[in-house]
């Protein structure tokens, strides 16, 4: 599956971040103030941990700053100028997110704190109403704990049955086994769009079609997809799509769930309190319309405004171009790392047409945490550990891995710094 630049990527004319249809990360970096900083030992920061959280561009930082300095007020309440401004900005952010995902209706976007909360919302609200004893829920072996543990809790409570699509040794889902699992007539199939550990880009539209043909609803965990590949929820056809803002150049505390209107309307509220109600009496209440039915209490208004600014920023870069940028970097990085360090263990699919900008690896004989610590001395920030996918590491028989991951601001120079840093790791550990 090749993802090429989308015809609806916005025009590049006049945008210095795009040249000859390609992103220019060296220009994009100037939008991210943190990338001009140095570590405490004077090394330029080489940030290769964007799968964990991304850095934030000025446009996002300034949108939040402007809100706090200029029109901080609660939303949907104040009948005064700054209250109306904050409500308008909050709802504009929702529309910006809907545009990024090509959602048919901005009211189908529910703001959450992150992907974890979005998935839990579905597990509690839809799951507790719809899963009955013996019902199957199909997941995959590569899920982040956020798309596993909520379903474990639900299955335990409802006496449901969890089944898992296995992976091949290079981290590709076994769709032949998926087909067999669908004969169990699961109520729900939930899978990640892009693996945070291996980078695998799953064929989500095909999987959704297969699940629907078997009568299941589909939840897609888009935490590692929205920042990196074009996401069109209508083309995917799923029922629920969850993601976090902080990995897509937006602030922490921002995220969203997209779901089809009729599902959201039928679902009971998740959290209860102010804002999610239309009418409250001492012994009964009526719920607000969607999306507000699912947004109880005062939301993180600044984070939502920042999320909207991030969605606009990515849309202007063009998600097709973002994807191509990361794929070109992978096409540079994988052979370069293998050539410089042939002894390194590299995991995940080697076909970059089905892989996002994630490079998990191990240096033989050196613990991943030691690798990360020595890389840190060179200013290179990577993550080491199980990346919240312990069952996947068990499946691959690995206690842990080191993971380098990209974003729009990642350059070939970052990859070169990683390669040099690995040489230093080997020097320190006598390899
Ligand atoms: N799913 C995937 C695939 C992820 O990579 C992550 C974050 N690492 C999550 C879910 C959870 O995201 P958050 O911690 O922002 O809720």
Image (tube, rainbow, N blue to C red):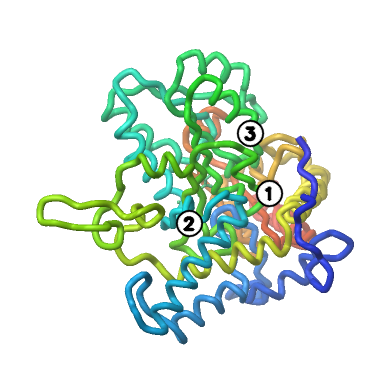
First of labels 3, 1 by sequence position: 3
Mark 1, residue position: 230
How many residues crowd mark 3 within 10 Å: few (<14), some (14–19), many (20+)? some
Q: Is residue 420 visible?
A: no
Q: Earlier in the sequence, mark 1 or mark 2?
A: 1
Q: Position of residue 217 (x, y in %)?
A: 47, 30
**Residue, x 18% and y 57% (percent of image)?**
280
Measured Cα–Cα span from mark 3 to mark 2: 22 Å
Q: Name the residue nearer the viewer: 245 or 209.
A: 209
Kindly state the secondary structure of the residue where label 3 is placed: helix
Report whether 11 appears left or right of 308: right
Please determine whether, in this image, residue 22 is positioned above or below residue 366.
below
Residue tagged 2: 255
Residue 5 as seen in the image, left or right of residue 163: right
Q: Can you tell which mark lies on residue 365?
A: none
Residue found at x 67% / y 30%: 170
Q: Secondary structure at mark 2?
A: strand
**Residue 172 lies in what quarter of the image?**
top right
Compute the Cα span from label 1 to label 2: 17 Å
């Amino acid at each position: 599956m090749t993802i090429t630049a989308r015809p609806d990527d916005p025009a590049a004319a006049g945008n210095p971040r795009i040249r000859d249809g390609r992103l220019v990360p060296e220009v994009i970096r100037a939008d991210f103030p943190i990338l001009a900083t140095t570590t405490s030992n004077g090394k330029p920061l080489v940030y290769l941990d964007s799968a964990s959280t991304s850095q934030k561009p000025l446009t996002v930082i300034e949108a939040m700053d402007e809100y706090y300095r200029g029109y901080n007020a609660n939303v949907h309440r104040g009948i005064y100028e700054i209250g109306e401004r904050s409500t308008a900005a909050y709802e504009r952010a929702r529309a910006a997110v809907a545009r990024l995902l090509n959602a048919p209706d901005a009211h189908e976007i529910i703001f959450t704190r992150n992907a974890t909360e979005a998935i839990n919302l579905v597990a509690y609200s839809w799951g507790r109403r719809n899963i009955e004893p013996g019902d199957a829920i199909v997941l995959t072996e590569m899920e982040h704990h956020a798309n596993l543990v909520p379903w474990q809790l639900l299955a335990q409570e409802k006496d449901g049955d969890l089944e898992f699509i296995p992976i091949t040794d290079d981290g590709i889902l076994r769709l032949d086994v998926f087909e067999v699992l669908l004969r169990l007539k699961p109520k729900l199939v939930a899978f990640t769009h892009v693996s945070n550990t291996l980078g695998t880009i799953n064929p989500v539209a095909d999987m959704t079609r297969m699940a629907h043909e078997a009568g299941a609803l589909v939840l897609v965990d888009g935490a590692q997809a929205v920042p990196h590949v074009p996401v069109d929820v209508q083309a995917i056809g799923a029922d629920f799509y969850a993601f976090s803002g902080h990995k897509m150049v937006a602030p922490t505390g921002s995220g969203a769930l997209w779901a089809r209107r009729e599902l959201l309307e039928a679902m009971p509220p998740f959290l209860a309190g102010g804002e999610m109600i239309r009418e409250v009496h001492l012994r009964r209440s009526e719920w607000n319309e969607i999306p507000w039915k699912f947004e109880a209490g005062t939301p993180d208004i600044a984070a939502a405004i920042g999320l909207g600014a991030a969605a606009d920023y990515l849309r202007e870069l063009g998600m097709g171009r973002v994807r191509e940028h990361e794929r070109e970097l992978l096409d540079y990085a994988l052979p370069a790392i293998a050539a410089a360090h042939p002894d390194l263990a590299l995991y995940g699919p080697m076909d970059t047409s089905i892989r996002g900008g994630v490079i998990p690896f191990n240096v033989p004989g050196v613990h991943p945490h030691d690798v990360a610590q020595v890389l840190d001395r060179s200013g290179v920030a990577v993550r080491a550990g199980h990346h919240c996918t312990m069952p996947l590491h068990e499946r691959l028989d690995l206690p842990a891995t080191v993971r380098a991951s990209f974003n729009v601001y990642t350059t070939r120079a970052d990859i070169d710094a990683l390669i040099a840093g690995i040489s230093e790791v080997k020097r320190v550990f006598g390899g």
